[in-house]
Image (cartoon, grey):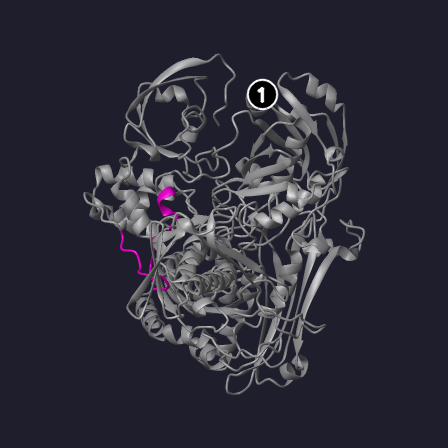
């Protein structure tokens, strides 16, 4: 590790982006820090400071290097090129244009590193092969894209040399269904997107957090003032005693239980205990091992099983047995159905903690504007952040403003507040702006994870192969505090049947506290864990019935008019049968290829797996509103106030496409205003695959309302067309046109002459004591097919191809939809084969492995459109759906290849090998 040496400054001379620069800094200062903080080039991103993620990749004399590992002294006299040095004024470099065109950037935090690594390759091989790209970019991690579009962009970059004609923009009323490039994409590929760590007030103090090194410990603070006074430049030391409001927050208010700073006991490793605030140069080098605190380590329970032991320590006095909550869905008589079933199967599975591993650690800054506290940070839910922060700091929400930065991945963990109340406390207590950037280790130790699950199930079918009964019990380790544990407990029982007719059913899910990391939202809210067991058992049940595995699923698939296990009748838009039908041809081909390959013998055996999914879009049986504002300004700009935070999934573009078609003006005329809580209405959290559906419906309503207001002003019918040129609004009907001078019309305080603001809240009903009701207004559906090989001698798994058929209702943007599918599949691969977070052992991206560019095979996406009448233009959500079938399809393919039944995830080679031996009777 390179230390930020306090030695005397020296002047260093180097070339940066073709310009000679001099930097007065310590020789050991990281080049990444020099570029970002001394030379104001924040396009070089920092994700780990250890060379593990590659986000900081720059060119040094033309070679790709990790700037976080390079001391400034080693760049002396050499040429450094950053993302800002590519391209020309107003024109993207060919590789940047290729990334934009092919949708190779999603959240954008890894994009500069990917582009710089790609640029180094292209300088040597202008038309590289896919294998060359995988090798050259293998050191740069991406958590969003699934890498496939990145490979395509680098391979095709040569086509963008020379003239780069602007991509055609869809005409008025024709934006939906068009693969429009990201409206915020240029900033992502040229490095000018600003993330949480990229900007702060010049006079900002730095904040560091003291955290518990123990899973469970009491503590006693010493003489904090004396310790602070002994260090010049240290401004404040803050503890729970300094919190002016309620020292408790949580994403679900009735379950709020997490302190911003622990009081006298820490319940998990990484829990925040105190803040150290001071000048950046002092705080960065401060040895927190000298902090005056005495720890008393206490017994800890780290698993749900241990936490349910009667002798286990209780984490919260009001939750006996460490039970946070439980969810239940029950219909029919599952015991009787299973007793009379012709065929039954049963099994269990254990899943692990899974880390979100977004490349951007939590970061932000805060300051005062008058009596308003302004917090600028990465987030998925600015409205929720404002509410929680206001409670902790004892402020009315009107005095807290949240400005979301670009968010470098979230996947659920950035729904919970992290540094927001801590930054706010530092500002309120010192009177100065403050900034805080988590280290990679700090981020991984302190933020939420996917719930580890322990699941048992039994399923039965009749003689024809129709499912007659289903039972599942599940315990989910929710960690020290509630977070999204109640949501997981309630969502899993609704979904555990899969998208199949199941007349007799009971599933219970319990969220159990432990001293492990807090478990929260992670792309699926527990549904992926349930799918891992249910879909493996469906394979076994199909075989017991003597049926083809795909045919079994097609027979049992839900269809329009069927009732779900909650008693909800799905009147229209049920697309799972369409997804399965679309896989029939690829399924037959894959099975034939596997049979042919396995004839050859040898240790590698080829297998084919299949799994389905369904997922309710939005909150479970709860109000879930989104509000969107659209306005026409006096200068002719169409302004979309769009608060649905874009964390890479594309809501900035998709919601604008919906709004444009509803209004009837070209997408190219829209100007976006993001989720700043002071200027944009709350569009709700970016989670639960809700934004395209819920915010999309609100955007469609707002666009239609604004159109109605304009047509009313012009006194024309709904058949009229609109166009705007400068300040002239032209309304045309039946060949006759009328011009409105926008500048002459009265404008409101924001400069708008026409405006509309609309809210949409999906129609749901509460679930009763047996889980009966209408939990979601819209469901999305999908099915995936995996082709792989297993080395029976070593337990290694090699993926060949994944074919994914997903029903989107209406495809708003095919390019972005494919990106979501590929990215979800990559995370599903990690869940199945490699990711296992071990508290205290895998708190970095070296020991915690996520899929790299070489781990994700070819992905074929089949986009199905079965419109749901409730969705905007018939659209449904997609974000979670893309991940859910991947892991079970991989596990089913492993079993098909070699007989190994995986009951503990991830399927690491030693576990696969043990399962092979057990299947062969050699265990």
Q: Is residue 820 left or right of residue 341?
A: left
Residue 182 covered by magenta stretch? yes
Q: Nearer the viewer, residue 754 or 160?
A: 754
- Crowding at dot 1, Cα within 10 Å, few <14 / some 14-19 / many 20+, comes out as some
Query: Residue 854's x, y, as percent?
Result: 36, 49
Secondary element at image label 1: helix
Residue located 54% across and 71% down the image? 498
Figure quadrant of the C terminus: bottom right
Seen as rendered, the residue at the extreme left is: 162
Q: Nearer the viewer, residue 552 or 366?
A: 366
The quadrant where residue 800 appears? bottom left
Query: Can residue 109 be seen from the camera position used here?
Result: yes
Image vertical order of residue 296 relative to residue 816, above or below: above
The span picked out in magenta is 167-187
Residue located 62% across and 50% down the image? 384
Return the residue at label 1: 282
Query: Can residue 649 be seen from the camera position used here?
Result: no
Query: Residue 215's x, y, as percent?
Result: 68, 42
Residue 68 covered by magenta stretch? no
Query: Residue 332's x, y, as percent?
Result: 66, 82
Image vertical order of residue 120 relative to residue 38, above or below: below
Q: How would you classify the magenta stretch by its main secondary structure? A: loop
Q: Is residue 442 left or right of residue 771?
A: left
């Amino acid at each position: 590790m390179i230390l930020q040496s306090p030695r005397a400054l020296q002047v260093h001379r180097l070339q940066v982006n073709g310009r000679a620069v001099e930097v007065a800094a310590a020789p050991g200062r990281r080049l990444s820090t020099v570029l970002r903080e001394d030379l104001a080039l924040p396009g070089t991103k920092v994700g780990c400071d250890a060379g593990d993620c590659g986000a900081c990749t720059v060119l040094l004399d033309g070679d790709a290097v990790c700037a976080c590992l390079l001391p400034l002294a080693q760049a002396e006299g050499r040429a450094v090129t950053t993302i800002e040095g590519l391209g020309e004024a107003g024109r993207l470099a060919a590789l940047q244009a290729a990334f934009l065109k092919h949708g190779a950037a999603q959240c954008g935090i890894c994009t500069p590193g990917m582009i710089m690594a790609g640029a180094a390759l292209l300088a040597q091989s202008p038309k590289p092969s896919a294998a060359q790209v995988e090798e050259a970019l293998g050191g740069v991690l991406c958590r969003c894209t699934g890498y496939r579009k990145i490979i395509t962009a680098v391979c095709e970059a040569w086509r963008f040399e020379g003239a780069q004609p602007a991509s055609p923009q869809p005409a008025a009323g024709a934006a939906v269904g068009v693969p429009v490039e990201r409206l915020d994409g240029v900033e992502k590929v040229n490095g000018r997107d600003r993330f949480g760590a990229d900007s702060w007030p010049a006079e900002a103090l730095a904040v560091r957090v003291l955290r518990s090194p123990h899973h469970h410990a009491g503590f006693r603070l010493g003489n904090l003032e004396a310790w602070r006074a002994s260090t010049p430049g240290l401004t404040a030391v803050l503890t729970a005693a300094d919190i002016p409001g309620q020292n408790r927050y949580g994403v679900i208010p009735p379950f709020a239980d997490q302190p911003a700073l622990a009081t006298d006991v820490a319940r998990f490793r990484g829990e925040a205990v105190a803040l150290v605030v001071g000048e950046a140069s002092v705080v960065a080098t401060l040895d927190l091992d000298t902090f005056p605190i005495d720890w008393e380590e206490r017994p800890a329970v780290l698993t749900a099983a241990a936490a349910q032991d009667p002798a286990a320590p209780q984490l919260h006095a009001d939750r006996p047995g460490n039970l946070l909550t439980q969810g239940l869905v029950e219909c029919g008589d599952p015991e009787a159905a299973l007793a009379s079933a012709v065929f039954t199967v049963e099994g269990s599975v254990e899943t692990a903690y899974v880390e979100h591993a977004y490349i951007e650690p939590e970061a932000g800054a805060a300051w005062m504007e008058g009596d308003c506290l302004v917090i600028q940070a990465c987030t998925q839910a600015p409205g929720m952040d404002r509410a929680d922060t206001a409670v902790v700091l004892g402020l009315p929400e009107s005095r807290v403003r949240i400005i979301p930065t670009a968010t470098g991945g979230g996947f659920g963990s950035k729904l919970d507040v992290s540094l927001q109340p801590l930054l706010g406390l530092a500002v309120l207590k010192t009177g100065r702006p403050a900034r805080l950037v988590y280290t990679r280790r700090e981020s991984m130790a302190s933020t939420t994870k996917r719930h580890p699950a322990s699941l048992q199930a039994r399923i039965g079918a009749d003689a024809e192969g129709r499912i007659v009964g289903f039972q599942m019990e599940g315990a989910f380790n929710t960690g020290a505090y509630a977070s999204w544990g109640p949501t997981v407990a309630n969502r899993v029982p609704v979904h555990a049947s899969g998208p199949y007719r199941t007349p007799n059913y009971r599933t219970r899910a319990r969220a159990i506290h432990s001293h492990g990391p807090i478990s929260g939202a992670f792309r699926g809210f527990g549904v992926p864990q349930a799918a891992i067991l249910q879909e493996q058992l469906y394979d076994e049940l199909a075989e017991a019935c003597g049926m083809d595995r795909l045919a079994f699923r097609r027979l049992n698939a839900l269809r329009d008019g069927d009732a779900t296990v909650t008693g909800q009748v799905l009147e229209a838009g049920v697309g799972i049968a369409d997804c399965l039908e679309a896989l029939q041809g690829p399924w037959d081909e894959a099975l034939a290829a596997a049979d042919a390959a396995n004839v050859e013998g040898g240790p590698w055996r080829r297998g084919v797996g299949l799994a389905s999914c369904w997922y309710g879009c939005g909150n479970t049986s709860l109000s879930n509103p989104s509000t969107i504002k659209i306005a026409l300004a006096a200068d002719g700009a169409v302004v979309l106030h769009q608060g649905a935070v874009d964390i890479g999934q594309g809501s900035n573009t998709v919601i604008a496409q919906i709004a444009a078609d509803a209004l009837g003006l070209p997408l190219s005329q829209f100007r976006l205003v993001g989720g700043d809580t002071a200027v944009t209405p709350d569009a709700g959290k970016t989670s639960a695959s809700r934004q395209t559906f819920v915010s999309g419906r609100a955007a469609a309503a707002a666009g239609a309302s604004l159109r109605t207001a304009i047509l009313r002003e012009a006194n024309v019918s709904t058949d009229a067309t609109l166009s705007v040129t400068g300040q002239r609004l032209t309304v045309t009907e039946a060949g006759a046109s009328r011009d409105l001078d926008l500048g002459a019309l009265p404008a409101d305080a924001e400069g708008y002459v026409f405006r509309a603001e609309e809210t949409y809240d999906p129609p749901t009903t509460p679930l009763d004591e047996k889980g009966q009701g209408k939990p979601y207004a819209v469901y999305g559906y999908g099915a995936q097919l995996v082709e792989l090989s297993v080395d029976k001698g070593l337990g290694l798994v090699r993926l060949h191809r994944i074919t994914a058929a997903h029903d989107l209702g209406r495809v708003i943007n095919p390019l972005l939809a494919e990106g979501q599918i590929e990215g979800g599949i990559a995370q599903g691969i990690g869940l199945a084969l490699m990711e296992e977070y071990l508290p205290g052992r895998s708190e970095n991206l070296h020991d915690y492995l996520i899929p790299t560019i070489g781990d994700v095979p070819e992905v074929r996406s089949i986009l199905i459109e079965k419109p749901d009448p409730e969705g905007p233009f018939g659209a449904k959500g997609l974000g979670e759906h893309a991940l859910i079938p991947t892991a079970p399809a991989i596990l089913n393919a492993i079993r098909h290849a070699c007989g190994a039944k995986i009951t503990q995830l991830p399927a690491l080679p030693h576990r696969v090998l043990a399962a092979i031996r057990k299947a062969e009777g050699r265990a």
